[in-house]
Image: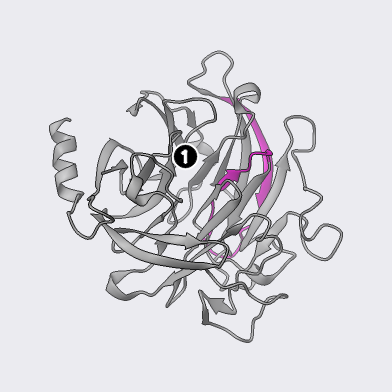
Amino acid sequence: MSIFKTALVAAIALAGACHGALAYTAVPIGTFASPVDVRVAPNRPGQLYVVEKPGRIIMLRGEVKKPTPFLDITTLVLNFGEQGLLSLAFPPDHDSSRRFYVMFVNLDGDVEIDEFRRSTVNGLRADPASRRVVLVVPHPVRENHNGGQLHFTPDGLLFISIGDGGSGGNEARNLESLLGKLLRINPLPAGAQAYQVPPDNPYVGIAGRDEIYAYGLRNPWRTAVQGSVISIGDVGQRNAEEVDMMTIVGAKGVNFGWPEYEGNLLFDPTRPGPDAPKFPIFTYDHTGGRCAIMGGYIIRDGGLPALRGRYIYADRCNGELRSFIPHVATQTATGDAALGITIANINSFGIGIGGQIYIAGGGTVYRLEP
């Protein structure tokens, strides 16, 4: 390990509270310009992709950065405050179709999802000319609460989480707006129509935008789809941070509560949603300098046996990594505990091809290890 890496590990790895007999460390794998998402592509072991908020995607091979960005769309991206390039996702057929999707705030301030393809000439680069606009969500009021991540399910459907637009929550309960929602679409590989709406989406054929799968979200900055389970780290307003976690089928048509509720606390009883709210599986308050949840993943890494099955998360303000055991069937959580690691300015988590957990904090991406 280099002197640089040894010094950073010594600075951030704390032998505090831990699970079982193990302590944990966060090993830096590289520095980046505001990393906000860490992804892998199907059937491409050894390749890792780091999304930089200004508008670049950096590929790593063997956790070593390639000198040229995989994709650079900085000229398309509005990078200010919570705006920027926000997420990346690869569909299950990426190996054959070469397609991938990005989510960003465009120069008009709207949330945009675009399709690109990997180059046929150089597989380590994307083809910028392959750009295809899939969906644009107007975001007219404020520059914050763009929210969101992209996640594919094994059947090729794309989940999109989007914040409420900083509008105080009115859009989150409005079924004619795509803000403050969890969306589900079927991106099409060719033709004039960029996507279809799955016919079993809950508002197909009735009042409400067909793309909506669930609603009542404030700022679902980081989400995850793992097997049949979807988890959402929804950033709170004043008092509560929340994690919503349920089966994908169970999330259909759900009202996550905002702005009537913040977490499981009543926030504004004069603004209920059309349906009764579904309360989170887990919440925490703002004591100890906490302010905004950074949602993570259920850990499946065989190298972290004491953490296996636990959901990892962090708070943006105090930087403490924690985990709890989710009980999806009963909608409860137990065993919330610190990992003994603090990282400043955590933005996101990522999961590797073998289940490795990555953490994007400040200008560095780390890998979690015992």
Q: Position of residue 290 (x, y in %)?
A: 33, 69
Secondary element type, mark 1: loop
Query: In the rendered structure, which amino acid carries the disc numbered 1?
Result: Gly
19 shown above or below 335: above
Q: Quadrant of the N terminus?
A: top left
Residue 109 visible in rendering: no
Residue in the foreground of this view, choosing between 237 and 298: 298
Where, by quadrant of the figure, is residue 305 drawn? top left
Q: Which residue is mark 1?
A: 55
Q: Position of residue 229 (x, y in %)?
A: 58, 53
Q: Position of residue 223 (x, y in %)?
A: 52, 53
Instruction: Tell me which residue sits at (28%, 56%) in the image.
Output: 19
Determine whether, in the image, residue 24 is placed left or right of residue 37.
left
- Other-residue count near label 1 (Cα within 10 Å), few / some / many at <14 / 14–19 / ≥20: many
Instruction: Tell me which residue sits at (19%, 58%) in the image.
Output: 16
Residue 67 visible in rendering: yes
Farthest residue toward the right?
205
Residue 150 part of the magenta segment: yes
Residue in the foreground of this view, choosing between 239 and 226: 226
Determine whether, in the image, residue 199 is placed left or right of residue 128.
right
Where, by quadrant of the figure, is residue 119 drawn? top right
Residue 142 part of the magenta segment: yes
Determine whether, in the image, residue 197 is placed left or right of residue 157.
right
Magenta stretch in the rendered image: 127-156
